[in-house]
Amino acid sequence: MVRKDSKPPGRALGRAGLARWSRPVRTRLVLVSILNLAGLAGWAGFAFAFAEALSEGVRGETPGLAAGLGICALAFRAVCLWLSDRMSTHAGRIAASAARCEVAIAFQTSGAAFVTGMAPGEVSSRIVDRSARLAGWVSGWIPGMRQAILGPILILGVAASQSVVVALILFVSLAALPVFIWLTASETVRVAAAEQAALETLAGSFQSRTACAGTLRAFRAVGRERDLLSRLCVDLETRTLAVLRSAFLSGAVLEFFSAVSVALAAVYVGFSLLGIFPIDTGETLTLREGMTLLVIAPEFFAPVRRLSALHHERAAAVSAAEVLSEWIEKAPAPGRRLEPLAEAPSLRFVQADVARSSGRTGAKGIDFEARPGEIIALVGPSGSGKTACLLALLGLASVERGGIYVNGRMLRPGESLADSVGYVPQTPWSGGGDLAADLRLAAPEAGDQALVEALQRVGLGHLGQASDQGLKRQMGRSGETLSGGERQKLALARILIGGRRILLLDEPTAHLDEASEASFLKVLRDLAPGRTILLTTHRPKSAQAADHIVRLEPSGGVRLS
């Protein structure tokens, strides 16, 4: 199908996003524009006062009143520009926060499956750095664009009141600038988008290498990865210089045009005051009129020069808006979360083809049943769809064919068992506070006794003892004060506190030694009664501890054992 709109979808989404995120600060931006124009009017007032004071001084008079008015005009201009800067900066922060709120809502309603495959550093850079670029659009570009349109009109009117010829010179010089600005705008957007993409790639690569620093040292791969990061840094440097090159080029052209036009105006004023201008222009300039023109002429181009300097911020904001808008648009529509199950359910996959919402290949022809009190192990090579089967129960993967039945009722598209599920990944997340706060993530209203009992059931009773700081024990960043096995058991304790009847475990023993794996599997077996448990694994001992093994074939289908 051919789109009626010739613009790329990303560009349309980006413009819609910029309009949406700047909407809360529209009134504030109008006030900023008024203050900017008031500051420009203050400069015009200073030009009149200065010219009058100079004329009085030449005539031998004391320029008392004119000098005082000029000082007041400068003070008024300074106050207006200060208020404008504060208000525009605050408006930019509001716009960036609005974009971040939309991203947070997308994560909250749709889950994080749509960012699967992106490095955590890349995701963080996109949320923090890209959204920060939006502030430049609101705080700089929008007020600058309005000032570049209204400011020259104001100065042109003042200049015309003193000399029609000078006003005509300024107008002709300015008329050629929009063409050049239009020619450089697309190139600026392109190089800014490339720079931001390079920054995201570097952030994601650096974060992933930092997280695996120990492994890199163990396998003596530090030098190789350092060279990779060095190449990414050089790429970012090259793209940043391309942005600066574009900005300097446009700025140099604007400076040339403004310098030539101001020089022409100054030549006309000087020759007219000397009475030797070779052409009869039909007007006679006085010293006061000439000095007024010379003072305000440079300010005629100041808003346009400022707008040229803001082209980089505009390009960065447009690129960021396109990426963030497409990202938010890509988030799957929020599904309907079913009511929490009071009892462990029977789960049955019937010839189900499951696809990840991120577009990655899922599982095909999945057919098995998980009954209450049983542990089902899903095994198979990477890419066979083990994790996709778990995510389908959370509404983060779609069933394209066949169906998933809960107690005989088929899950409809968009429905989720998330409120009945306890999920344990390879590396469980920790809030980094004390032990009690970490456990209460599952049930904020849980009492201390319930927390201690949950710890005892999963074999972590010693953590709740007063000799080991008890529930006030600090967990550290990502639970760094605990061993790998203790972090996995702590995740099980949270599930117990939350009362979830379905346990989904994605490679829970992947990073555990044999002793920790055996201890974890024993706890899992003790928790099986009254729960339905599905786990994915590559480790033979973890699979053998299950009641049934479902082997997923790369070509589709399963084998039961």
Image (spheres, rainbow, N blue to C red):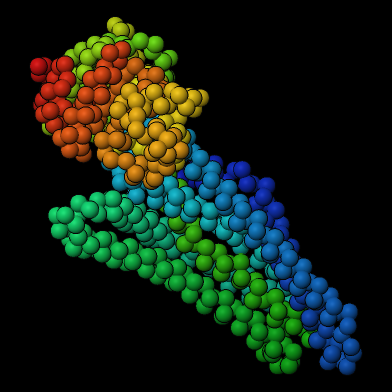
- The residue that appears at 30% across and 7% down in the rendered structure is 407
- Seen from the viewer's position, the closer of residues 358 and 65 is 358
Compared to residue 519, the image places residue 160 above or below, namely below
Report the number of discs.
0
The percent coordinates of residue 124 (x first, y second) are 39, 48
- Seen from the viewer's position, the closer of residues 138 and 442 is 442
Could you say which quadrant of the image residue 298 lies in? bottom right
Could you say which quadrant of the image residue 206 lies in? bottom left
Report if residue 338 is visible in the image. yes
Classify residue 531 as left or right of residue 244: left
Compared to residue 102, the image places residue 416 above or below, namely above
- The N terminus lies in quadrant: top left
Compared to residue 269, the image places residue 355 above or below, namely above
The percent coordinates of residue 484 (x first, y second) are 26, 39
The percent coordinates of residue 137 (x first, y second) are 53, 54
- The C terminus lies in quadrant: top left
Compared to residue 156, the image places residue 277 above or below, namely below
- The residue that appears at 14% across and 25% down in the rendered structure is 543
- Seen from the viewer's position, the closer of residues 489 and 146 is 489
